[in-house]
Image: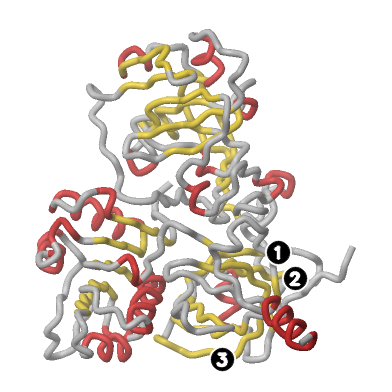
Amino acid sequence: MTDRFVSRGFVGRRRNTGPANRIPPGQYVTEDFPVLSAGPTPRIPLDQWTFSIEQLGHELVRWNWDQFIALPRQEFEVDIHCVTKWSKLDTHWEGVSVDLLLERIDLDPRIMYVTAVSYGGYTTNIPLSDLLNGQAFVAYNYAGEPLEPEHGGPARLVVPHLYFWKSAKWVRGLKLMEHDKHGFWESFGYNNHGDPWKEERYSGD
Amino acid sequence: MAIDRLRSALSGLSQPKTARELVRTPLAWQIATVKEITAETPRVKTFTLTIPDWVQHRAGQHYDVRLTAPDGYQAQRSYSIASEPEREGEIDLTVEYLEDGEVSSYMHEVLVPGDLVEVRGPIGGYFVWEASTGGPLLLVAGGSGVVPLMSMLRHRAAANSDAPARLLYSSRSVDDVIYRGELETLGALGNGLEVFLTLTRSQPEGWEGFGRRIDRPMLEEVAQPFGSRARVYVCGPTPLVESAANNLVEIGVPQSQIRTERFGPTGKN
């Protein structure tokens, strides 16, 4: 290993490290829940909210709010990691697993990538393989309460093993695609994949 | 002549590249040197860093700073660039001291000119403004949120832009106004920039600016000449940004024309 640069006189406070094997490189633990959205917060009335799945350009299914919250729900306790360096441990959510949503459609074998689309225009792209097998859910409750708009309510995608910009707030659907396409932050210089354990923050990392 | 070809080949290698040209290559960590440290307010300092592999940034972008302890422990944070892209080879990072800030406390309490700091950047393609984009430009800042907006105003001046621009800047007291003298000077140039200050906790005697938190009437007044054409950048603590952005949407500024950057904790779990 090459000689590492050492900052003169730095010892670190080390209060915010948390259990070492749960904190990805470059992150610190916060008790807070920062809001770092790009742009104003969209407000979507529940009687207008829908969630749809589109495959290869065709809409296959759409739920309204009442239908969506009637789907089998699960509770999830996960650590989340933001690219702006904060990590929050043991966050508690309630929602629907993406696996369950995809079971409701006939998944085409050509599908490799997914774009999550949100009210307000936000998008983010994720490989299908990162969304299956319990790795992702659409959450509408956080810490036992309905998810607030600032944090992505009425519902947001949650993909805890990737940087939290991939957990699209105000999600309104998933587009299943053959080819990958940069979403919002990905087209502004952020990493296409976003694995915090490999510190994939910016494009080229 | 061979020597001329060699010279031009070498000068091509040392040409500073713009951030756009390097957007797909890794942002490598590099060791910067602290050139100068300036106290802006009692809790805010500007660190001028000489950057070996300097790449021209865009106003609004940031750098990441990484500190390493002897045992390998590291802490990283992002800081907005305060200086204009036109200033080559170095950047200003204006950093507020936070009580429990691991990196800001080191920078304020330990760093001296001549020290080395590991950095990488410039980063960010969303919260940026270039003079070629034009105005009218509405900048709304709370506390140290003024830093990336200052980069925009310094760039506007360096680029000789007369795009109409207004800065609405909220601070606790007059002593907390970062870049106060420079903002007065820029606002007095008569080239289309107006600066509006609001002091939320205490105002000096004879104060003629605003004296309360940014609210809808204040935004309506400041945004009035620009109306729905305003290109808006809001930066500061989340509650301020949230409130200002919501109010601007209600006033009639299209959502797509409002860009936000939020600093710091929300204050709630």
When the figure is inspected, residue A123 is found, relative to residue B67, above or below; the finding is above
**Residue B69 - label:** 2
Asked if labels 3 and 2 share a chain, the reply is yes
* Residue visible at 49% across and 53% down in the picture: A188
Front-most of A77 and A96? A96
Image point (56%, 17%), residue name:
A99
Q: Identify the amino acid type marked 3.
A: Glu
The first of marks 3 and 1 along the sequence is: 3
Please name the residue that numbered disc 3 is placed on.
B36
Which amino acid does the dot numbered 2 rest on? Ala
Q: Choose the circle earlier in sequence order: 3 or 2.
A: 3
Q: Find residue B209 and report its horizontal and vertical position in percent.
A: 15, 80
| Kind of residue at badge 1 | Gln
Residue B143 image position (x, y, % from top left): 35, 72
What secondary structure is found at the residue carrying circle 1? strand
The chain to which mark 2 is attached is B
Q: Secondary structure at mark 2?
A: loop
| Scheme of image coloration | secondary structure
CA–CA distance between discs 3 and 1? 24 Å
Alpha-carbon distance for marks 1 and 2? 6 Å
The image position of residue B259, as x and y in percent, is 33, 56
Which residue was labeled with disc 1?
Answer: B74
> Which mark, residue A199?
none
Nearest to the observer: residue A159 or residue B164: B164
Rendered residue at 15%/63% (across/down): B219
Dot 1 surroundings within 10 Å: few (below 14), some, or many (20 or more)? many
Tell me the quarter of the image containing the N terminus of chain B.
bottom right
- Quadrant location of residue A132? top right
Q: Which residue appears farthest toward the right when viewing the image?
A: A1
